[in-house]
């Protein structure tokens, strides 16, 4: 995930899950938690599928806070999406 803290770009690695058109991920640290509340953030994931094809997806969306079982989660809407797959 990419965001700004104090007008500086910050990249934060996150574990994520895709659910009902949103990307959900936990965040740690108060500074990152504050920087994501109702702000626009970028998200990128890439990998290799079962046939050894490389893929990458980038998302730009608005982050909203959720709390579940005491854990801080970010719910990222998918407002813009782009990607590619190498065959």
Image: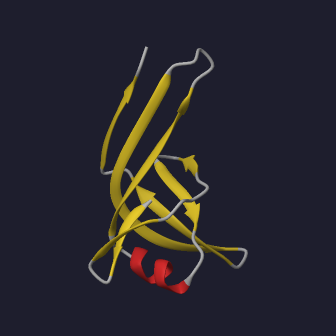
Determine whether, in the image, residue 65 is placed left or right of residue 61: right
Res 50 quadrant in image: top right
Q: Residue farthest to the right?
A: 69
| The C terminus lies in quadrant | top left
Determine whether, in the image, residue 69 is placed left or right of residue 29: right
Residue 81 vs 41, above or below: the answer is above
Q: How many marks?
A: 0
Determine whether, in the image, residue 29 is placed left or right of residue 82: right
Query: Measured from the top left, where is residue 47 in percent x and y?
Result: 54, 34
What's the residue at 26%, 79% (across, down)? Answer: 7
Query: Measured from the top left, where is residue 18 in percent x and y?
Result: 55, 47
> Is 33 in front, or is 77?
33
Structure colour scheme: secondary structure
Query: Measured from the top left, where is residue 49 in percent x and y?
Result: 58, 24
Residue 48 vs 46, above or below: the answer is above
What's the residue at 57%, 81% (across, down)? Answer: 29
| The N terminus lies in quadrant | bottom left
Residue 57 vs 43, above or below: the answer is above
> Is 60 in front, or is 70?
60
What's the residue at 40%, 79% (across, down)? Answer: 35
Query: Measured from the top left, where is residue 45 in percent x and y?
Result: 48, 44
């Amino acid at each position: 995930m990419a965001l700004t803290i104090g007008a500086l770009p910050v990249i934060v690695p996150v574990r994520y899950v895709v659910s009902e058109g949103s990307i959900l991920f936990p965040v740690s640290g108060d500074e990152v938690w504050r920087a994501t509340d109702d702000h626009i953030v970028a998200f990128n994931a890439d990998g290799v599928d079962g046939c050894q094809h490389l893929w990458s997806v980038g998302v730009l969306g608005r982050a909203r806070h959720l709390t579940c079982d005491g854990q801080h989660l970010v719910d990222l809407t998918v407002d813009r999406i782009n990607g590619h797959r190498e065959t």
